[in-house]
Image (tube, rainbow, N blue to C red):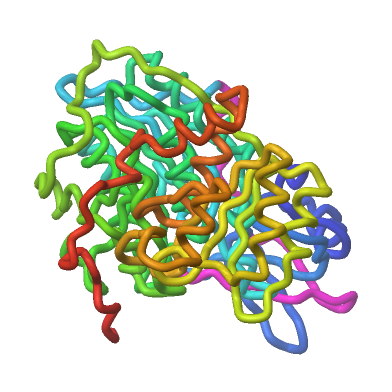
Amino acid sequence: MSLDSSGYNGLVLEKLSSSNIKVGDTISIKKNEEENVGVLMPRSQVGSDQFHVIIKLESGYNIGIKLDQGTEVFRIKAGKKKRTAPAEKDPIVKGLPTASILSTGGTIASKVDYRTGAVNPALSAQDLYDTVPELRKYANVRAKVIMSVLSENIQPADWTKIARSVASEIKNGTDGVVIAHGTDTLGFTSAALSFALQNLPVPVVLVGSQRSSDRPSSDAAMNLIGAINLATKADAAEVFILMHAETGDSYLHAHRGTRARKLHTSRRDAFQSVNDYPLFSVTGEDVKELRVPLLRRDTERKLTLKPNFEEKVALVKTNPGIEGTIIEHFVDTGCKGIVIEGTGLGHAPDRLQPSIKKAIDAGIVVAMSSQCLFGRIDMNVYRSGVELLDIGVVPCEDMLPETALIKLMWVLANTKDQEAAKELFSKPLAGEIDMRSEESQYVSGLGGD
């Protein structure tokens, strides 16, 4: 590989270029009477660092070394030259299903910046395929990069782009779609795709990893293999999130795309179904159905693509002392919808009612969810809830607040007026509303490792 696309710049690029060194060459780096010898690796970085070089030691470990003006760098052996002809595609294996891997970034598609230790988006979808060669045992894989961003930077317009990419893969005859995505907003994207991709003929599986592939405890390979097996074997056709079911490496759980939330910052089993149960378990190659899915796999079914979202929708969490000016700000700035994350059964402080009424009178759809993750709201129990219903607040039933937010964004992009939006918002569309919530669906908490 030439240095043009190596990721190096500044002092490092100057020293490598002066010695005619290329990525893949075996080099020596002498600094302060210490010598390190290894194969020059490409630089995966976010930022403008110009002092660190990455080499792979004979032991197989990669290290980053900071260079200065006195550091000596020279080539010991040239790396093998790459073929100038286009690389041949992997042969199609008869009898294996076809799976599409769409990469968006995140920890499952990342490399380590050896200067800072930070995990940055870098791997392409093909890199995922190459990094986990076992995938070839289970499917003929079509790998594509949609974007390479950390999931906290995902925008509603990105959901539209992802949905269209999924639709394109389905049109081209894939048996299932896997989307590699960062975990922080995985639940948001899965909900968005659940509404944007209607009448799916095959499964769409969003998968991430809590720990990057350079760590011994990484869950990336197991999650990705499991996602391929779920996408190609499950007799289902809806949007799933697939992640570890417990802290070990025994099995994975597939959660409905509108019903899962990340409940822990770092555990591998951070994702849990809320007001619902997992639909499938995946153990190695075995895909076991736990609950009946919304739709069965049917390649003759025609996908309905509705990928647009109204971005001017807000999620407001109530708290003691909250001022009505917060609601009024969204009215004044042209907001089209507001989801209130209220307390208990769906309550908000009385002091907010005049501002909420002002928003509704202005044509804004206002919906009420609960800060309690489990259970459903019931605004007919207490006076404050009844009064909110009377002024036109729409109950979110047992929807997660973030699912309600995304559903309202989608509804407002696909309806023309406030009443039509309220009616569509209140209908179960993608398993996001269950008219019966069981107490047994409550998960008491995640235990320790």
Image position of 66 with respect to 174: above or below:
below
* Range of magenta residues: 59-85
| The quadrant where residue 68 appears | bottom right
Please tell me which residue is depicted at 24% across the width and 69% down the height of the picture: 442
Q: Magenta span has 110?
A: no
Whole-percent x and y of residue 350?
Answer: 61, 70
Label tally: 0
Please tell me which residue is depicted at 62% across the width and 61% down the height of the picture: 316
Q: Is residue 349 left or right of residue 52?
A: left
Q: Is residue 43 left or right of residue 230?
A: right
Image position of 311 with respect to 296: above or below:
below
Whole-percent x and y of residue 173?
Answer: 33, 16
Image position of 292 with respect to 176: above or below:
below
Q: Nearer the viewer, residue 159 or 66?
A: 159
Quadrant of the rendering where the N terminus is positioned? top right
| The quadrant where residue 215 appears | bottom left
Q: Is residue 1 visible?
A: no
Whole-percent x and y of residue 288?
Answer: 9, 47
Whole-percent x and y of residue 381?
Answer: 36, 65
Q: Is residue 327 visible?
A: yes
Quadrant of the rendering where the C terminus is positioned? bottom left
Q: Nearer the viewer, residue 449 or 130?
A: 449
Q: Nearer the viewer, residue 304 or 19?
A: 304
Q: Is residue 274 left or right of residue 23?
A: left
Q: Is residue 104 left or right of residue 432?
A: right
| The quadrant where residue 439 appears | bottom left
